[in-house]
């Protein structure tokens, strides 16, 4: 009798664990609810993207905490500003944090995600902190993308995942892909509403290529113009306020390579590619 009771108890515990596993798997899914991205943007400029996520219907108490990842398919020559902000809201305090570029995530996406079409690449980042999705109701990711000088129709794609084991193809995989968007079209063109704005005033960066010592010229440069230099992974390398129509900037401490230099004024941003030899 004791053996029978023990056997039955083991079966019961196994069934409980089994069904709990089903609940966790079924309840651990979050999906992209919507993405706000402009339909038309200007060349050599920036635009903002908002990604909203929501939990799958049902109880979210079983959701695991983990390091989140963000993947973006970008046209070659475009880049993402690093330190992407996110927030997660639920029954408790709002959790905020940032995604930062991570080469390991890019490698993971190149191995496990759908390969981008010709002329596109994966950009990847992971959360700086563990994200707690237990009892969460909404989540938002806000990011900024910089275009290049090319005109035409392009597209982007977004992926979110984490390092919990539910969505890994193999237990040894570093991450799993939880939710992804379709490709979203975006046109790069000049529009009538922006013809006469500061964003379209001509400006120069020379010499380009350079050894790191450059000049920036624009007639309307006044106090409050902020110059920023990013590497191609969106990491800020230098920031400086420009106060004259012609400004000397020393970037000789930067390694050889390709960078993005931008000017920011009253929320408007325009950018150029800079080569340091």
Image (cartoon, rainbow, N blue to C red):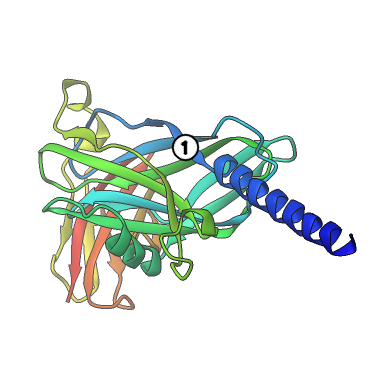
Label tally: 1
**Image side of residue 247 versus residue 162, left or right:** left
For residue 232, say whether it is visible. no
Q: Secondary structure at mark 1?
A: strand
Q: Residue at x 73, y 40 (%)?
A: 93
**Which of the 4 quarters of the picture holds residue 199?**
top left
| Rendered position, 173 above or below 242 | below
For residue 157, say whether it is visible. yes
User: Where residue 238 appears, x then y in whole percent?
Assistant: 39, 64
Q: Residue at x 30, y 71 (%)?
A: 251
Hey, which residue is sitting farthest front in the picture? 1
| Rendered position, 212 above or below 121 | below
User: Where residue 220 appears, x then y in whole percent?
Assistant: 26, 41
Hey, which residue is sitting farthest top in the picture? 193
Q: Which residue is mark 1?
A: 31
Using the image as rendered, state which of residue 210 and residue 29 is in the foreground. Answer: 29
Using the image as rendered, state which of residue 275 and residue 114 is in the foreground. Answer: 114
Q: Residue at x 22, y 21 (%)?
A: 193
Quadrant where the image shows the N terminus? bottom right
**Image side of residue 69 versus residue 265, left or right:** right
Label 1 crowd bin: few (<14), some (14–19), many (20+), radius 10 Å: some
User: Where residue 169 appears, x then y in whole percent?
Assistant: 41, 60
Quadrant where the image shows the C terminus? bottom left
**Image side of residue 24 versus residue 78, left or right:** right
**Image side of residue 108 versus residue 166, left or right:** left
């Amino acid at each position: 009798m004791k053996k029978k009771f023990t056997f039955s108890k083991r079966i019961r515990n196994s069934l409980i664990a089994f069904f709990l596993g089903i609940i966790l798997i079924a309840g651990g899914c979050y999906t992209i609810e919507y993405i706000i991205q402009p339909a038309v943007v200007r060349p050599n400029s920036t635009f903002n993207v908002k990604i909203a996520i929501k939990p799958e219907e049902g109880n979210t108490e079983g959701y695991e905490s983990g390091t989140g990842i963000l993947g973006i398919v970008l046209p070659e020559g475009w880049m993402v500003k690093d330190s992407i902000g996110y927030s997660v809201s639920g029954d408790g305090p709002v959790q905020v944090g940032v995604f930062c570029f991570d080469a390991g995530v890019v490698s993971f996406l190149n191995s496990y995600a759908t390969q981008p079409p010709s002329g596109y690449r994966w950009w990847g980042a992971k959360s700086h902190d563990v994200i707690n999705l237990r009892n969460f109701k909404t989540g938002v990711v806000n990011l900024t993308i910089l275009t290049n000088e090319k005109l035409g129709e392009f597209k982007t794609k977004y992926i979110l995942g984490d390092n919990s084991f539910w969505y890994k193809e193999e237990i040894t995989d570093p991450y799993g892909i939880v939710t992804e968007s379709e490709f979203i079209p975006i046109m790069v063109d000049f529009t009538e509403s922006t013809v006469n704005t500061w964003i379209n005033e001509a400006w120069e960066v020379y010499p380009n290529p350079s050894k790191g010592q450059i000049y920036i010229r624009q007639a309307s440069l006044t106090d409050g113009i902020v110059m920023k230099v990013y590497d191609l992974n969106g990491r800020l390398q230098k920031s400086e306020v420009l106060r004259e129509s012609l400004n000397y900037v020393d970037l000789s401490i930067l390694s050889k390579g390709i960078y993005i230099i931008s000017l920011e004024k009253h929320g408007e941003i325009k950018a150029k590619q800079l080569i340091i030899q």
